[in-house]
Structures are given as C-alpha cells and as structure tokens.
Image: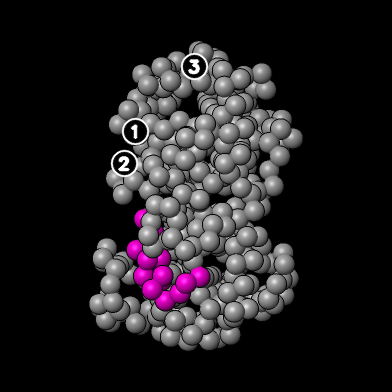
Amino acid sequence: MALLRSVVLAGGGTGGHIYPLLAFADALRRHFPEVRITTLGSPKGMENELIPPAGYDLRLIPAFQLPRAVNLNLLRTPDRMWKSAHAAGKVIDEVQADVVVGFGGYVSVPAYLAAWRRELPLVIHEVNVPPGVANRMGMKFTKNVAVGFPHQPQQAESLRSARVVGVPLRTAIARLDRPALRPSALAHFGLRPDLPVLLVSGGSQGARAINLAVAGAAKALTHAGIQVLHVQGGRNDPFEVPHDLPVPYVVVPYLSDMQLGYAAADLMLCRGGAITVAETTAIGVPAIYVPYPHSNQEQKRNALPVVEAGGGLLVDNAEVTPEWIERTVIPLARDPQRLAAMGRAAGAYGRRDGDEALLDFVCEAVAR
C-alpha cells in the first residue's frame, strides 16, 4: 500500500456526496495516522454542517452549477470555473497533495481541473447511473474511476471499465451489530421491545409524500401494534400526528446517529438514494423503497437490484398514500418470517468494506 502523506477530498452539496467522503477520510486516518486530510467544499453546501464537526479541515472555494451537457466547450465557459479551479489549486499546492479523490457535487469540478493541470493522481467515486454531471466531466481527466454498485458498469457505458468497490459507510454503520444494539436503541427512542418498529426516512432532507402518507396512516399502524420511528428530514415541513395513539409513534426532525434507527427497525420505508441503499443492504434491513420521482430515475436503478434479490419492495411515489400503507406496509410489518427472509437477502447483496476497497484503489493509483 502506497504511503499517503497528504490527500485532498472533494465533494459536497448533499449527504450523498459527503457521507462517503467522511467514511473514506476515517479509513485514511485509520491506516495513515499522520496523513494530512483536506476537504474542499462550497459556502452553501451541507458540508459546512457535517465536515467540521467530524474533525476534518474544510476549505471553502467558489462552486457554480454546471450546464447539464458535458463537453469540451464546458472548459471554456464560463471564466468563473477557471477562477474556482485556481482556488482549488492553491489549496492543493499549499498542502502538497499526493492525490485528489472526488465524490461528486459541483465543488468537485474545480478540484478535478486543478488536479489535471498539475498531472496529479485523480480518483473519482460515483454511486449513480447515469453519473452526475460533475463526475462525468471529471472522467475526461482520469481513468481511475470507482463505483459503489455492481449494476453501474452494466448500465452506463462511461462506467464500463470502473472498479466496483462499494460505498464507503460510516464506521458506526459498517460495524453495526443490530441484535446487540437493539435493546439500547429501543430504549433511546422510548420504543417497546415486544412490538415491531417501522423506520421512516426520506433521507437527510426528508420526503413530504412519505411523511404525509405515514402520518395519515398513524392510527391504522399503531392500532395494528406497529410502532413508528419517523425521521422528518432536516429540510422538510412538520406534519401532524394524532395524539393518544395506542403504541409509540416517535417523530425526530433529524437523526445523526442513524445506526440507532437501523438497530431499532424491523422494516424501513425510505427513498432509494445510493447511501440509503448501501446502508440498508450492508446491515440487512428489509426496506420498501420509494424512489424520488423528479429525477432521471437513478434512485429506482439503485433499489431495483436489491428488490430483484429479494431484499425489499419498490413502489412509485404517487402510490404512497395512507390507504397503501394500510394495505401493504401493515401486513408486511406484522410478518416476522418474511421480514427475516428479506433481511437475509438484503445483507447478501450489500457490502461493508467500501471504505477499505476504495483506499486500496487510491493507493494503487498513487503508486502508478
């Protein structure tokens, strides 16, 4: 394994870029305790909320939204992109980076440009099909491309030669022992140990359609003996839950210790974001995936292989109503044998070593 002395990590905007970055940073620190880790972010992204509390150096550079089309003309327009690349280059030079590792988001593009101009090793990690516009641009400058899931090289020509390494997961989740943590997780949320728990989450920002459907079915769920742990989402509007329900219905605005939610859950209702899919499958949580509808269907592509493996269900966003919750979720949540089989199938599909596998790949790129 090549010795790494200074690494620049680029990625921001949403948790889908930032959480793998942080997990990879933790792996770097485990293997190279003296390594200098510098992260690049933009002034408005979620990285400002997540990276400094994790103990890593965050340098802010200007980042701008890119046109959806990726071609060489993009390099010439606009001039502000070159100014952003200059800012990223100043950081790279200051810390004498051995390699730049990018996870996507607009802030990655200046780092990719700066690394290319310095002929510095560049590694890109991508979790979606099709790849995000920032990573598609970065792929013009490097052949060192890693992906999170086996279906990605099969579905995207640009990823055909990429290495499947998995998704770097937070240590608390990658090493989670659900049965061992379950009693304390239930106690933490005030949930009963004798009834099933439905974990609801629309991701870091939340999903209004899911929130309203589950809240609307609160009486039916709890009268069926199903407890609910509902993560509203940090950027989603509050919703009303009836009072005096027969069993716990716990609403939290945001859950930073997501491992506690996974440990408490018997079933999850969630979006199909790459990080959510990677986490649920790595630890074997059966899930009903509701892909975000206003996109290029990458969330459906993320979840479909898990569903085909028997580890979950897939439902369109428009179908998620209180009535659908009663027809579909309640019978499933009350079927422990079926949940156990789905959990085993999900766990067989997932992997927990994405951080280590990506680190091996980065070290190979530096050695070359």
> Residue under circle 3?
331
Image coords of residue 23 (percent x, y): 60, 58
| Residue identifier under label 1 | 316
Residue lying at 58% horizontally and 25% vertically, measured from the top left = 339
Q: How many marks?
A: 3
Q: Would you name the residue on which mark 2 appears? A: 293
Q: Is residue 187 magenta?
A: no
The location of residue 132, given as percent across then percent down, is 37, 60
Q: Earlier in the sequence, mark 3 or mark 2?
A: 2
Question: Given the image, on which type of amino acid does mark 1 rest?
Answer: Asp
Sequence-first tag of 1 and 3: 1
Residue under the image location 34 percent in, 82 percent down: 82
Q: Main secondary structure of the magenta part?
A: loop
Say whether marks 3 and 2 touch (CB < 8 Å): no
Return the disc, 2 or 1, that comes first in the chain's sequence. 2
The CA distance from mark 1 to mark 3 is 19 Å
Disc 3 to disc 2, how far (Cα)?
Answer: 25 Å
Part of the protein shown in magenta: 130-144
- Compared across the picture, whether 180 is left or right of 248 comes to right
Name above or below for residue 333 compared with residue 56: above
**Which residue is drawn at the image coordinates 50% and 58% (left, top)?**
147
Residue 123 location, x and y as percent?
Answer: 51, 70
